[in-house]
Amino acid sequence: MDYGWMSHALLWLIGLMSIGATLGALGALWSMGRSNYRKD
């Protein structure tokens, strides 16, 4: 394992985590908006 591979894996990990966090936040906002919108 050289330094280039480690930094590359770290960048991939950060990218995947940021994408997951963005999708999770969007999903939470969407579900909250839907539950608020469907108040009968």
Image (cartoon, rainbow, N blue to C red):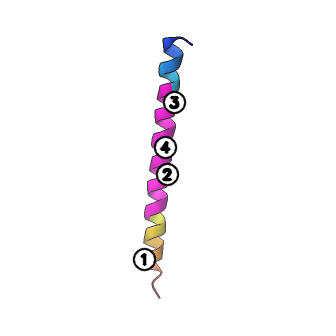
User: Within 10 Å of the Cα at label 4, are there few (<14), some (14-19), or many (20+) other Cα atoms?
Assistant: few
Residue 3 counted in the magenta span: no
Alpha carbon distance from label 1 to label 2: 20 Å
What is the magenta range?
10-29
Expressed as whole percent of the image width and height from the top left, the position of residue 20 reads 50, 46
Instruction: Indicate the secondary structure of the residue bearing disc 3.
Output: helix
Instruction: Indicate the secondary structure of the residue bearing disc 2.
Output: helix
Instruction: Indicate the secondary structure of the residue bearing disc 1.
Output: helix
Alpha carbon distance from label 2 to label 4: 6 Å
Q: Nearer the viewer, residue 30 or 1?
A: 1
Chain-order first, disc 4 or disc 3:
3
Residue named by callout 4: 19
Contact (Cβ within 8 Å) of mark 2 with mark 3? no
Residue named by callout 1: 36
Q: Nearer the viewer, residue 9 or 33?
A: 9
Q: Which mark is residue 12?
A: 3
Q: Residue at x 49, y 51 (%)?
A: 23
